[in-house]
């Protein structure tokens, strides 16, 4: 919310005393005043730009959606306190069990995944879930950051974290393969993105002329390429252009390389 500061200055410009003696010997005092209003806006929650400690701001959701927050569909909005509002998001369809009892509705249990760490002051942190942007947050002036992805169904996920400093230099992607349980929130903590990990982003090409990580040759490195690499995950002797570090297998190192050259 932008804070408007208003100041009214009243100045006495003229004090004119005129003594008239026409017909009546009366004195008239004329006072002329002028009011000047000054206003200034202080940037903060409500300026439609994600700032320090904000998950979102107005229409700026940082690429997040109901799906990235663990819901099946719906419209994600931002609250007046610059936090995600999931009241219009739709949960996953309940699973009906036919194992006796006439069909019992089993509601899926969704949990929170909490990310905490430190990086360079005011860097923008990007959180990926299976290659898709799930959340963004701006680190505090002391470099600390924390954010939560809510409503994540139990299962195995490949989370990724990278940062972008105020000079638009980007860090390498940190990979976190995690199994989310339905018993307690999952904490991914002690994430550290150091100063020397931020490098000027570049887009080197392979010998064929395509971008590194562009597995389907469409001149983009995005979720389609991630899906192709996921198919070859842990398989031996994958195609050469899929094995990004040429070690004859697809593992988390290849996913990290793909994340670094991600174009979306």
Image (cartoon, rainbow, N blue to C red):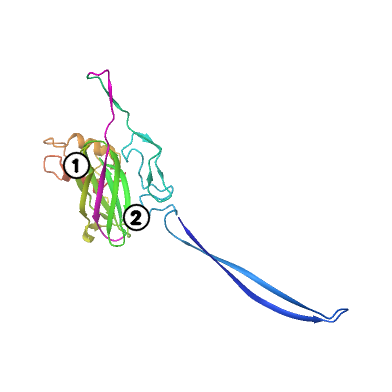
For disc 2, the marked residue is 53
Q: Quadrant of residue 224?
A: top left
- Left or right: residue 138 versus residue 26 is left
Find numbered disc 2 in the image and state the secondary structure of the residue it sits on.
loop
Q: At which x and y percent is residue 256? A: 20, 46
Within 10 angstroms of label 1, few (less than 14), some, or many (20 or more) residues?
Answer: some
Distance between the alpha carbons at the discs numbered 1 and 2: 25 Å
The local secondary structure at tag 1 comes to strand
Horizontal and vertical percent position of residue 97: 25, 22
Graded by Cα atoms within 10 Å as few (under 14), some (14 to 19) or many (20 or more), the crowding at tag 2 reads some
Q: Which label is found at residue 178?
A: 1
Q: Residue at x 73, y 75 (%)?
A: 30
Q: Are marks 1 and 2 in contact (CB under 8 Å)?
A: no
- Decide which of tag 1 and tag 2 comes sooner along the chain: 2
Of the 4 image quadrants, the one containing the N terminus is bottom left
190 or 215, which lies in front?
A: 190
Identified at 41% across, 48% down, the residue is 60
Q: Magenta stretch: residue 111 in it?
A: yes
63 relative position to 228: left or right = right
Give the image location of residue 50, x and y in percent.
38, 53
Most extreme residue toward the right, as rendered?
23
Q: Position of residue 116 (x, y in %)?
A: 24, 52
Task: Give, as a single range, the part of the protein colored magenta.
Answer: 100-121
């Amino acid at each position: 919310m932008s804070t408007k500061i208003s100041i009214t200055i009243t100045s006495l410009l003229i004090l004119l005393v005129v003594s008239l003696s026409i017909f009546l010997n009366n004195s008239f005092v004329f006072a002329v005043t002028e009011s000047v209003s000054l206003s200034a806006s202080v940037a903060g929650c409500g300026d439609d730009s994600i700032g320090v400690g904000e998950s979102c701001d107005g229409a700026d959701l940082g690429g997040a959606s109901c799906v990235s927050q663990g819901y099946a569909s719906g419209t994600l909005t931002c609250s007046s306190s610059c936090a995600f509002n999931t009241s219009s998001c739709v949960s996953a369809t309940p699973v009906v069990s036919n194992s006796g009892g006439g069909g019992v509705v089993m509601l899926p249990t969704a949990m929170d995944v909490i990310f905490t760490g430190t990086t360079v002051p005011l860097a923008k942190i990007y959180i990926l879930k299976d290659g898709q942007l799930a959340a963004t947050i701006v680190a505090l002036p002391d470099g600390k950051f924390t954010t939560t992805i809510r409503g994540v169904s139990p299962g195995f996920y490949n989370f990724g974290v990278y940062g972008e400093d105020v000079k638009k230099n980007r860090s390498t992607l940190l990979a976190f393969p995690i199994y989310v349980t339905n018993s307690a929130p999952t904490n991914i903590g002690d994430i550290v993105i150091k100063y020397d990990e931020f490098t000027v982003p570049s887009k080197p090409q392979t010998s064929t002329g395509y971008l590194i990580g562009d597995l389907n040759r469409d001149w983009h490195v995005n979720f389609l390429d991630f899906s192709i690499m996921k198919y070859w995950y842990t398989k031996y002797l994958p195609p050469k252009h899929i094995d990004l570090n040429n070690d004859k297998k697809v593992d988390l190192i290849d996913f990290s390389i793909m994340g670094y050259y991600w174009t979306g």
